[in-house]
Image: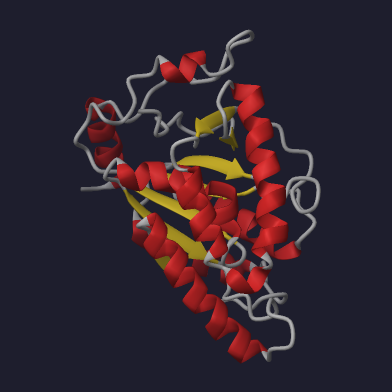
Amino acid sequence: MDLASRRNALKRAGLLTGTITLGLPGDPGAAQRESPGWRESSQRAKVVVAGGHPGDPEYGCGGTIARYTDLGHEVVIVYLNRGELGVRGEAPERAGAIRFAEAAKACQILKARPLYSGQVDGRTVVDEAHYEEFHQLLAAQRPDVVFTQWPIDNHSDHTVVSLLVYQAWQRMNKTFALYYYEVSNGSDTVHFSPTHYIDITGTAARKRAACYAHASQAPDKYYSLQEQVTRFRGIESGYQQAEGYVRHVQSPDFQLPLG
């Protein structure tokens, strides 16, 4: 089935809508709670979450990933690199092996599948060759929706993965829905204002477990910051905890896991 046909099938199944599911003033989560959600359809969707390093997708989208997989959808986590510079006192090869193992454990907790694009931590590249390479990697996954990091970020690897996803989206004729997520807002991600919120109250414990699987990454420090973000997004959207996203204005308005 080609991508156009697949999108038509998803529309018939109720997984794609033309309505923006934004919260409303006075009850920010109301429009989302009124949505029919995903549980009314048996159509299995393909979800890709892309991040610069092992841990980024888990910290930014872990609750949402758990919601997707709990509803029976397939989630692939694409890591731009193995985090080779991210373990204090360890040589890059050893650090990459440690973080590879941690990512495998985190993905098991979230019931997602890891995939690596093969770049190197701290030396990620944006050029025509890497644009095309990442395009081919993403096209092979045939995603219905992709989440990637917000491009205005203080870590260059986060910006690079965002640009690679965006260019792949362009080259794939914008056939999948595109959303951006935040990590360590104010420390890494800046100037982020969500258009959509996902209630993660029921999956926050699994998100925490997945983040703590990255034991080499000082989770006591970084998870505390990320939890502050999810609690604040919860205040904004009317939930206990929520993850916020920005939908690209030209993206299809893909039905998020609201059930």
Residues 17 and 8: in front is 17
The residue at the point 45 percent across, 51 percent down is 206
Image position of 157 (left or right of 257): right
Task: Count how many numbered circles sit on residues in the image.
Answer: 0
- The quarter of the rendered structure image containing the C terminus is top left
Q: Quadrant of residue 22?
A: top right
User: Relative to 170, is 87 above or below?
Assistant: below
Residues 120 and 257: in front is 257
Can the viewer see residue 162 in this picture? yes
The residue at the point 43 percent across, 69 percent down is 105
User: Relative to 31, is 237 above or below?
Assistant: below
Residue 156 screen position, x and y as percent: 75, 63
Residues 84 and 105: in front is 105
**Render colour scheme:** secondary structure
Residue 103 screen position, x and y as percent: 49, 69
Q: Quadrant of residue 12?
A: top left
Residue 54 screen position, x and y as percent: 56, 67
- Give the residue at the far top of this rendering: 26
The residue at the point 40 percent across, 59 percent down is 109
Residues 48 and 139: in front is 48
User: Relative to 216, is 225 above or below?
Assistant: above
Image position of 228 (left or right of 39): right
Can the viewer see residue 159 in this picture? no
Residue 241 screen position, x and y as percent: 57, 34
